[in-house]
Amino acid sequence: MSIALTTPPPAFAFSGDRIRAAFTIPDAVSDAGNNAVNKIYLDEELSVGMSWTLIYGGKQVTITVSNTPDDSGTQLESRASSSGPFNNEYQAELLRGNYILQNDFIIASAVDGIQLIARKKGISFNIDTYNITPGVKEEIKPNLQVKFILYCENAANLAWENIYETELTVLIGDEGTAEAVLNDKLHDYMMAAIREQMPDIPGEDPLQCKKSCRRYYFEYAEIFGDVPMIQKLHKSSEFTVLHGGLSTIGQATKDLAELLAPGAVESDRFLKQGYVEQHTRTDQPQYLYFFNTRANVTATMKCKFWFTNGTASTIDLYEGVSFLLNRKYGFDIRFDHIFDPEDHPTLTVKKYEVWLVNDAAAVISESRFWILDYDYRQFYRYFLNWSSWGTFDSRMFYGKSSTELELVQAEAEKSDHNPQQISKGESLVFNISIATKFSVTTGFVKNKTELIFNRDFFASVLKYRVYNNLLLPIKVTSKSIPEQEDGNNLYAQKFEYEYLFDDHAYTEGDIEGEPEPPVHLTGLVYFGFAPTVPANEDDIFLLPNSQSPDVYGFPLVTGTNSIFVVATPPGKKLATAYNITADEDVTSEFQASDMIVDDLNYEVNVMQMAVAYTLPQTIIITLIDE
């Protein structure tokens, strides 16, 4: 019987997870051999002076008879000193105290003596004079190995390439076994193309992601013989590998197939982690990827736009896309790429929803939602990272940043210096380069889950800053990044990064300048809790907090109160209110009215609770310019 593939890889798997193939060679042992059996016959007249010398495999053990045997394992008890009936099991137990014999043999009593059965096969356990069944060494096929050759589709999915070839060691038990670990070879092969050619980035049309999703197979055969010969090659089925991986805990607790297809077809997941509802800006890059775990299908991506007036409109975003089994597809769903304002010139989109249907209009995926963020952001930056699931994830950080440069240069001293030509100097500099470094904060993160999801950004080996529609490669240089602090519900992070290239020259526009300053505003922003709904400007002045009018966000701590007020001067208005303690959007709870405050027409926003909070809450207030 020849070699067999007993544990094939899964039909599809992430390249960063453990992928193995296990083989069995049933006839690896050509002769099973047997264990030697030896026997010491015990005479009923067992008496002091009798002895046995056991010689085997270069070892010698002498056994004697004593009236009072010690625990050395080299003495048996004489018949004369035995107080009961003659007992061979007791004699065998005495012999088991011998370290050498006990290590090499199973010592068992017999009717007429003691048997020593070799623990291993072979002739070296045949005891001279006392052997009754000769031991025979098992015969293993000489020079036995497994030839293994791994093939993977190239980056264009047009040809197969031999990416790994080796001879696997065979472990011998009842039969021969060997194992090949595939994931590191597949991951490195795919990663090389992704680094060289950039990741799979969808454009105007849906993209089949050929660099980050590939088929592979392998060939395998026995090798054996005094002159090793490769036997018949066997070919495996084809499998699929997706670039990416689960965490260590994820691999221990989750199954990829169940993650992507957790139940009915309408719950099939996109290759995206995090909340199904996320925030985005109109010009923020957004991509969505789908891996088809089911049969071939012709699909359409639907998109539903929800407007601020409560109406909605659904369009076919991408029609008639052919999804092949175990293939991956990417879509560009950036808002200003998929929404035409001329279709709805008087309406404003609040959020949009994306899902897939088949050619019979049946839903074949989950829905994903993006909420439009129209808030004014004086400082904001877009970042992309190649995620753990092999997709481009987008993030917007709006905290302040700082920039510094590191100047690197070489200097050489001139061999001949003429003081009369001082302008030429005594040395020269060359190989000058500038390394630009940044420090940036994320701005307030809405909740702890979103904060922790930033780990996927920091762990990514491919991170980019989006600048002037270019992807500038970066690396995060911070060794420690703050994450959670007990009792602090204001979530934000600060980190440092730098570009993965140096500049040897400068062109205007390389570094973005300070954004245009906002329109000058007068008055103050007043906010906080109040004992009653404010009736006049004196009540507004009594609010516990105030900020300059150029503020765009701040926390409102409720205490155990029931009335909360945000009063904004002309040119400023309330945009959102989010209770991060309860993870709840409370914007709609604030009711606006006008009031003259300090001779200015203020907008006074009041949230009045029927019952006061029993525990303090933190509400993140964001403002926008009118």
Image (tube, rainbow, N blue to C red):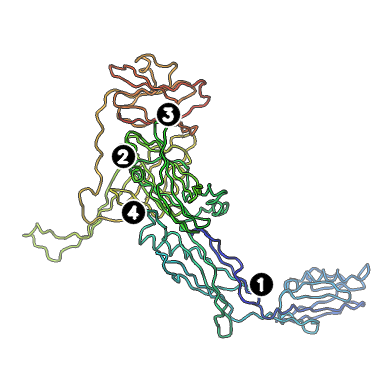
Type of the residue with mark 3: Thr
Q: Are marks 2 and 1 in contact (CB under 8 Å)?
A: no
Mark 4 or 3: in front is 3
Examine the rendered structure and indicate whether residue 477 appears above or below residue 614: below
State how far apart marks 1 and 3 are (Cα): 69 Å
Give the alpha-carbon distance from disc 4 to disc 3, as whole Å: 38 Å
Say which residue label 3 marks.
587
- Mark 2 or mark 1, which has the lower sequence index? 1
Instruction: Tell whether 502 sits left or right of 281.
Output: left
Q: Residues within 10 Å of mark 4 (few under 14, many from 20)?
A: some
Gap in Å between the C-alphas at discs 2 and 3? 29 Å
Which residue position holds label 2? 342
Image position of 205 with respect to 185: above or below: above
Disc ID at residue 473: 4
Q: Residue at x 43, y 27 (%)?
A: 588
User: In whole angstroms, how far apart are the C-alphas of marks 2 and 1?
Assistant: 74 Å
Mark 3, other Cα within 10 Å: few <14 / some 14–19 / many ≥20: some
